[in-house]
Image (spheres, rainbow, N blue to C red):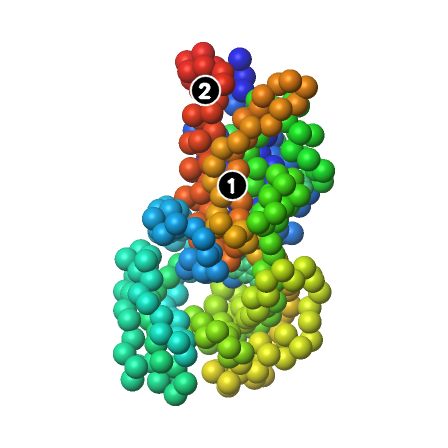
């Protein structure tokens, strides 16, 4: 019996999950169904900064495990000799704030994490009271998603563009469904605890900016500067329950003013693009767990993998592997041991 697997969602988590499923169950028949694929997913506009962020509600040990797995993958790409095509760079920098920031639970994962003294923080601006420095990996999803999709295809997976109104639509022809629909899960599960956190950014050309900088203050000075390979991402906003996808001129003003206050050299740089994305947040944090739907009296197992908020790039590989492992367990439970498949 060939097991029919449907992954719903074409973002970093859907494509990562599809690849992890193919690694776990190489003989399955795999289809990825999604309304959007790269370059139109949330991760495509994100900087791809590795740093667990805006992810309230996820247990610390899970966040650390998922982000460690993803760090390991980015590190492999970085060392592969092909890091440009994977879109990975190694970037040092600082996060500072006007409030006290505790040491991060993930501080042992990136390179050279160091808590800054008050004097060191003040070098970035007298208002800063706490902060830390580390060297991280930045992985641009707009570069690595097409490569991951090619790997899914090489392993026999196929892609279908479709806007679903329910998971049942695909479940009737599947033996298992993996739901990686980000904000779409709000309506498809349905899950009321899913909500958007609006993020507006600008991409500029400023090749002299070699370090990342994040002002994580809880007031209007919040901003970040994140170097990518060809551009630098200037941000940003984090507006909960705001569904607007258009660029807001007032947000542009704030981003520009805050970034230039910290880095006056950005003043004359060329703006390449402005973008708004909706972070798929969830009150209880990232959801990677199992479920079941019933279609025409048939019980179909489901694995959910959504709610990654502001760090879906930083955690996608750990979450994808866990989702694939849950899928393998469910297939065993519903259809017998792998030797029979
Ligand atoms: C401004 C901004 C900056 C960010 N920066 C970073 C960063 O530096 N580092 C980091 O780790 N994270 C960052 N993030 C967060 C990160 O981009 C997201 O957490 C991540 O991309 C979510 O991926 P996903 O695959 O779960 O969801 P998505 O990319 O949103 O994908 C969901 C998929 O499901 C499909 N779908 C939804 N509903 C349906 C339906 N009804 N039928 C069919 N298909 C459906 C969609 O078409 C899409 O393909 C940022 C986000 C924003 C907005």
Q: CA distance from mark 2 to mark 1?
A: 20 Å
The structure residue drawn at horizontal position 42% and vertical position 37%, both measured from the top left corner, is 322
Q: How many marks?
A: 2
Label 2 near ligand 1 (CB < 8 Å): no
Q: Secondary structure at mark 1?
A: strand
- Find disc 1 in the rendering and name its residue: 305
Residue most toward the bottom? 126
Work out whether residue 202 or residue 121 is closer to the camera in this orientation and state it: 121
* Observer able to see residue 27: no
| Above or below 64: residue 3 | above
The structure residue drawn at horizontal position 51% and vertical position 41%, both measured from the top left corner, is 305
Where does the image place residue 38, in percent across and percent down from the top left? 61, 48
The disc at residue 333 is 2
Work out whether residue 218 or residue 19 is closer to the camera in this orientation and state it: 218
The structure residue drawn at horizontal position 48% and vertical position 22%, both measured from the top left corner, is 331
Q: Residues within 10 Å of mark 1 (few under 14, many from 20)?
A: many
| Above or below 267: residue 173 | above
Q: Say whether marks 2 and 1 touch (CB < 8 Å).
A: no
Where does the image place residue 282, in percent across and percent down from the top left? 54, 51
Work out whether residue 23 or residue 176 is closer to the camera in this orientation and state it: 176
Earlier-in-chain disc, 2 versus 1: 1
The disc at residue 179 is none
| Above or below 323: residue 207 | below
Q: Secondary structure at mark 2?
A: helix
Work out whether residue 203 or residue 107 is closer to the camera in this orientation and state it: 107
Label 1 near ligand 1 (CB < 8 Å): yes
| Above or below 121: residue 305 | above
Where does the image place residue 85, in percent across and percent down from the top left? 49, 52
Where does the image place residue 239, in percent across and percent down from the top left? 59, 66
* Observer able to see residue 186: yes
The structure residue drawn at horizontal position 45% and vertical position 26%, both measured from the top left corner, is 328
Q: Quadrant of residue 45?
A: bottom right
């Amino acid at each position: 019996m060939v097991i029919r697997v449907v992954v719903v969602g074409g973002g970093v988590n859907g494509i990562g999950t599809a690849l992890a499923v193919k690694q776990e169950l190489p003989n399955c028949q795999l289809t990825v169904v999604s309304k959007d694929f790269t370059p139109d997913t949330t991760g495509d506009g994100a900087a791809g900064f590795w740093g667990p962020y805006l992810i309230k509600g996820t247990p610390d040990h899970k966040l650390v495990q998922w982000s460690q797995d993803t760090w390991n993958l980015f590190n492999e790409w970085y060392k592969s000799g092909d890091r440009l095509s994977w879109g990975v760079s190694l970037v040092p920098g600082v996060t500072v704030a006007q409030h006290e920031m505790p040491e991060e639970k993930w501080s042992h994962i990136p390179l050279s994490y160091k808590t800054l003294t008050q004097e060191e923080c003040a070098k970035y601006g007298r208002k800063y009271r706490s902060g830390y420095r580390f060297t991280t990996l930045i992985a641009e999803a707009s570069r690595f998603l097409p490569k991951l999709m090619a790997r899914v295809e090489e392993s026999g997976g196929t892609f279908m563009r479709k806007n679903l109104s329910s998971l049942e639509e695909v479940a009737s022809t599947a033996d298992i469904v993996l739901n990686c629909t980000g904000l779409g899960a709000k309506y498809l599960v349905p899950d009321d605890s899913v909500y958007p956190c609006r993020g507006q950014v600008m991409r500029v050309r400023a090749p002299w900016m070699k370090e990342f900088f994040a002002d994580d203050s809880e007031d209007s000075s919040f901003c970040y500067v994140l170097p990518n390979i060809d551009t630098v991402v200037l941000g940003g906003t984090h507006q909960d329950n705001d569904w607007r996808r258009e660029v807001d001129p007032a947000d542009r003003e704030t981003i520009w003013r805050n970034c230039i206050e910290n880095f006056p050299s950005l003043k004359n740089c060329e703006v390449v693009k402005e973008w708004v994305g909706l972070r798929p947040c969830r009150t209880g944090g990232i959801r990677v767990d199992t479920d079941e739907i019933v279609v025409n009296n048939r019980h179909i197992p489901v694995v959910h993998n959504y709610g990654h908020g502001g760090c879906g790039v930083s955690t996608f590989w750990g979450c994808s592997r866990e989702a694939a492992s849950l899928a393998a367990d469910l297939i065993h439970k519903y259809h017998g041991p792998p030797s029979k498949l």
